[in-house]
């Protein structure tokens, strides 16, 4: 394989393996029929949820979400069902292994869930190491209890001083692991298993496996030399996987927000086969990828001189990410406040004009609207009726704003005891992913910089890829809903 920085023959050739204007080949009647099946399944799940219970509802939801994905397929006749069925079975196997499986170590039987809970505690302790640096820089501001001088006063979560410092530390740590080749070795092992089982191309599978540890724009760098010549289906797979996963650094941050560690860790692993088979269901492969049936070698030399250089570079990358997260939250939460203010004026304004206002509830807000729109998705995940609107509001916030905002809203609900523990766990499965509207632009900029000649393809694929990535997180949650005790 040529070096990563070597010129790629034909990389600037505008003739992509598949034309970006390739029409959808799924007959309209099929698409309408599948949508009708989805609506029927949703209606049945709603009508029978009291009879079949949350687990039965989640089982119906798994089927309903897959039917919905099939309705969005660009060429349902061309789907490689080996990839789809193999991916579903692998996803189920991983979920059952984590939630109900056990392993024998040193003559002692350990539950896999217990091991994941132990890993979660290690992650929490690992995040705690960053508190030492944060306390040195920010003093008492890094410890909210130190400034709670007014008895009985509720203090908000100090995001800037508690959530952002771990991003710097974890980013530096993972960059050091990359420098020593540790991440690449783990990623290559995952990729080989999925290439063998699912029959996907090596390059796309390697990038999907890298998404367990790396972000939506960093993972494609693992296969940078191949991206300009990828098929349209492979490009879509890169995007869907980016939306369905989170990076290792964000994994630690979400656990720090109070999300269930087992749910966050499990859904990151489950998202590998899920994002692959959903991408191949929605964007079936219709040509022969360059790395079909093999895992490409990616022995790219580390760009860092030593571990200190890697840690410094990782810190700088983490700082950019932390500032970006903080800036986006400031802006998007301001927009939410603005829309809530406008919605609060709607009822008085219509009343002033003498129009009927009884249909408008008091306290109308964006959160309430999200709850109405996404409550059916929460129901199909297996969330109990009393919590469906709350979880629906979190899903809507995650898609339209970002997962940070949704997790912080969930943290408030957790502190108030506003939902049952099972609902919090399923919400953590569904919120763990970068599937939001802003991420479409992030991927266009990140992957587009790797392959400028394919930016037009990426733009064409963005909306449907976001849809598939969001569905991946819902399917992960629905499978957990089937396997998790009520």
Image: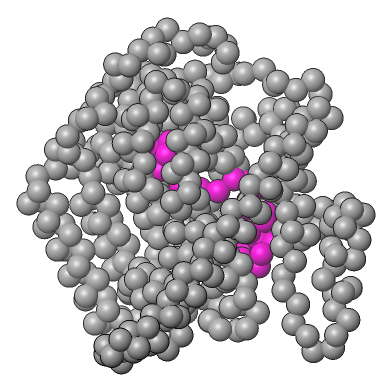
- Residue 254: name its quadrant: bottom right
Q: Main secondary structure of the magenta part?
A: helix
Q: Is residue 52 above or below residue 83?
A: below
The answer to whether residue 283 of the structure is visible from this angle is yes
Residue at left 21%, top 76%?
44
Give the percent coordinates (x, y) of residue 362: 42, 89
Question: Is residue 388 highlighted in magenta?
Answer: no
Q: Confirm whether residue 124 shows in the render.
A: no
User: Going by the picture, which residue comes out furthest to the left?
Assistant: 29
> Which residue is at a point 27% across and 52% down the rendered structure image?
69
- The coloring applied to the image is one colour
Asked whether 263 falls inside the magenta stretch, the response is: yes
Q: Position of residue 290 (x, y in %)?
A: 37, 18
Does 156 appear above or below 216?
A: below
Left or right: 207 as drawn, with respect to 259 = left
Image: 51 above or below 478: below
Q: Magenta residues, as a range?
A: 236-264
Does residue 252 appear to the left or right of 146 in the view shown? left
């Amino acid at each position: 394989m040529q070096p990563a920085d070597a010129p790629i023959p034909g990389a600037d050739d505008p003739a992509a393996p598949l034309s970006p204007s390739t029409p959808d080949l799924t007959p309209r009647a099929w698409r309408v029929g599948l949508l009708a099946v989805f609506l029927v399944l949703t209606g049945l799940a709603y009508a029978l949820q009291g009879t079949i219970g949350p687990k039965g509802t989640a089982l119906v939801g798994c089927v309903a979400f897959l039917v919905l994905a099939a309705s969005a397929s660009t060429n349902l006749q061309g789907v490689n069902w080996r990839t789809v069925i193999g991916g579903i079975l692998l996803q189920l196997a991983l979920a059952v292994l984590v939630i109900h499986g056990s392993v024998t170590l040193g003559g002692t039987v350990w539950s896999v869930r217990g091991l994941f809970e132990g890993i979660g505690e290690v992650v929490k302790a690992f995040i705690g190491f960053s508190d030492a640096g944060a306390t040195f820089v920010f003093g008492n501001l890094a410890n909210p209890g130190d400034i709670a001088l007014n008895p009985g006063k509720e203090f908000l979560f100090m995001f800037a001083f508690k959530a952002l410092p771990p991003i710097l530390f974890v980013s530096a740590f993972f960059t050091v692991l990359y420098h020593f080749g540790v991440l690449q070795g783990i990623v290559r092992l995952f990729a080989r298993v999925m290439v063998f089982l699912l029959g996907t191309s090596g390059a796309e599978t390697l990038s999907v496996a890298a998404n367990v540890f790396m972000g939506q724009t960093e993972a494609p760098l693992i296969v940078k030399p191949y991206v300009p010549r990828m098929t349209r289906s492979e490009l879509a797979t890169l995007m869907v996987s980016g939306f369905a996963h989170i990076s290792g650094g964000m994994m630690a941050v979400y656990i720090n927000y109070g999300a269930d560690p087992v749910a966050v860790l499990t859904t990151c692993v489950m998202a590998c086969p899920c994002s692959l088979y959903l991408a191949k269901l929605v964007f079936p492969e219709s040509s022969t990828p360059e790395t079909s049936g093999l895992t490409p070698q990616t022995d790219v030399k580390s760009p860092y001189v030593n571990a200190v250089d890697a840690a410094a570079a990782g810190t700088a990358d983490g700082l950019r990410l932390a500032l970006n997260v903080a800036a986006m939250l400031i802006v998007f939460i301001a927009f939410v406040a603005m829309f809530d203010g406008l919605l609060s004026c709607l009822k008085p304004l219509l009343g002033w004009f003498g129009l009927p206002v009884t249909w408008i509830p008091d306290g109308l807000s964006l959160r309430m609207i999200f709850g109405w729109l996404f409550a059916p998705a929460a129901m199909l995940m297996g969330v109990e009726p009393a919590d469906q609107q709350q979880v629906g509001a979190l899903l809507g916030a995650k898609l339209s704003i970002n997962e940070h905002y949704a997790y912080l809203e969930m943290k408030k609900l957790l502190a108030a005891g506003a939902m049952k523990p099972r609902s919090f766990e399923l919400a953590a499965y569904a919120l763990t992913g970068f599937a939001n509207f802003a991420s479409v632009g992030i991927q266009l900029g990140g992957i587009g910089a790797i392959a400028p000649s394919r930016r037009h393809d990426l733009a064409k694929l963005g909306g449907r890829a976001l849809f598939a990535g969001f569905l991946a997180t819902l399917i992960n949650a629905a499978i957990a809903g089937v396997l998790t005790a009520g």
